[in-house]
């Protein structure tokens, strides 16, 4: 297996910065601001979108959010919908595991793969491959990497699972688990998505909120070619002939540290802006004399999300305030009448988008997405 090199002074400094930002984010998550749920759902949807986009499974963040509550967006084909729903299910399971003790073993790995790949039985969901597998560079058609021999997969996965998430630093061991899993390539398909899910499971050791608030899938979705490039460099073309010298894994560690730092900086900016935007929409709701529960719809809208009755009801249920369909419809209608949401479609398929007033409040707070792509190791 690939193992991490000892971090040098530069890497330790970046790791410390990530930890400091992470501590602030975890404290924020524990304080329970009323809009934290909307931030959590938005962040998870972006992680799901980013991870799947790397594999050519495309949907908007809004569509991912719709699928998460059982809606079927007309703009998403059936296979994509099932693939995203399966990935969401696997991530939901990981988030549940994060609330208690868990043991990574072959059975858990196969179960997660079944969730991810069961939409297509030709992908052998839950079954390890037995033959060779190649990663092909789409632009040239050349073989960029060959995974471990099929006969070795079961034994390698057992070895991998036994030590993958046992390191002293959960962030580093989760990154190395990602690397080793994707290079072993134990399944016919879905190895990249699985590697990122296992990384999230490893991050769960940091805190219950870490799999969402410290996930890097969104960043990787924006830097897909760089992600593939560093994997190819470290993998050396073929698992069976690779040199497992820890120093050869240093480019991967630096890429992962850069990813975590950029994702953490972006999320910290969103948290600060979300607090200001939330106060603005709370004032708007108070001026319109709307029930306090309607803020759940406005929190979602301030992130630019579409609001539907199903999503509004799910958000309230998550917050511990379930309501009936009739009450949900009345609330959303009242928000539209107050000029805070804009209604679209007929009654059965009605959806609501943020009004210009809510959009302006979000813009003023700076609730946009401004990736800086900082390279902390740039000379």
Image: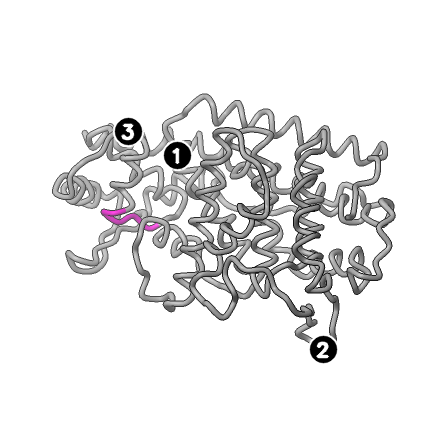
Overall secondary structure of the magenta section: loop
Nearer to us of marks 1 and 3 is 3
Query: Which numbered dot is residue 320?
Result: 3
Residue 7, above or below 47: above
Q: Residue at x 60, y 58 (%)?
A: 191
Mark 3 and mark 2: span between their CA atoms?
53 Å
Does the magenta portion include 296?
no
Q: Secondary structure at mark 3?
A: loop
Look at the image and tell me whether residue 268 can be seen: no
Within 10 Å of disc 2 (Cα), the crowding (few <14, some 14-19, many 20+) is: few
Distance of mark 2 from mark 1, alpha carbons? 44 Å
- The residue wearing badge 2 is 140
How dense is the environment of label 1, judged by Cα within 10 Å: few (below 14), some, or many (20 and up)? some
- The residue range painted magenta reads 306-310
Q: Residues within 10 Å of mark 3 (few under 14, many from 20)?
A: few
Q: Tell me the residue at 67%/68% (across/down).
A: 133
Asked whether residue 309 is drawn in magenta, I would say yes
Tag 1 residue: 37
Q: Position of residue 19 (x, y in %)?
A: 66, 28
The disc, 2 or 1, on the residue closer to the chain's N-terminal end is 1
Marks 1 and 3 sit apart, C-alpha to C-alpha, by: 11 Å
């Amino acid at each position: 297996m690939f193992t991490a090199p000892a971090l040098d002074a530069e890497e330790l400094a970046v790791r410390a910065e990530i930890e400091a930002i992470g501590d602030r984010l975890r404290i924020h998550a524990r304080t329970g601001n009323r809009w934290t749920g909307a931030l959590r759902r938005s962040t998870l949807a972006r992680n799901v979108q980013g991870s799947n986009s790397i594999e050519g499974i495309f949907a908007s963040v809004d569509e991912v959010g719709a699928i998460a509550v059982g809606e079927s967006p007309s703009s998403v084909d059936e296979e994509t919908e099932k693939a995203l729903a399966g990935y969401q299910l696997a991530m939901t399971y990981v988030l549940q595991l994060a609330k208690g003790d868990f043991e990574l073993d072959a059975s858990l790995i196969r179960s997660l793969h079944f969730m991810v790949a069961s939409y297509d039985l030709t992908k052998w969901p839950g079954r390890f491959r037995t033959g060779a597998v190649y990663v092909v560079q789409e632009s040239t058609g050349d073989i960029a990497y060959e995974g471990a021999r099929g006969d070795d997969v079961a034994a390698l996965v057992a070895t991998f699972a036994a030590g993958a998430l046992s390191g002293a630093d959960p962030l580093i061991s989760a990154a190395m688990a990602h690397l080793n899993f994707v290079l072993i390539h134990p399944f016919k398909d879905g190895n990249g998505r699985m590697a990122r899910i296992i990384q999230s499971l490893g991050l769960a050791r940091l805190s219950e909120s870490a799999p969402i608030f410290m996930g890097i899938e969104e960043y990787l979705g924006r830097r897909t070619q760089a992600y593939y490039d560093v994997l190819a460099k470290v993998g050396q073309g073929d698992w069976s002939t690779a040199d497992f010298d820890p120093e050869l894994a240093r480019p991967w560690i630096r890429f992962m540290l850069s990813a975590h730092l950029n994702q953490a900086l972006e999320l910290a900016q969103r948290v600060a802006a979300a607090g200001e935007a939330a106060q603005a929409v709370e004032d708007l709701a108070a001026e319109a004399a709307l029930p306090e529960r309607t803020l759940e719809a406005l929190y979602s809208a301030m992130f630019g999300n579409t609001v539907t009755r199903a999503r509004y009801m799910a958000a309230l249920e998550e917050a511990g305030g379930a309501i009936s369909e009739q009450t949900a419809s009345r609330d959303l209608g009242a928000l539209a009448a107050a000029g805070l949401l804009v209604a679209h479609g007929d009654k059965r398929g009605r959806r609501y988008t943020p009004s210009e007033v809510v959009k302006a409040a979000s813009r003023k707070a700076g609730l946009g997405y401004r990736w800086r792509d900082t390279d902390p190791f740039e000379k």
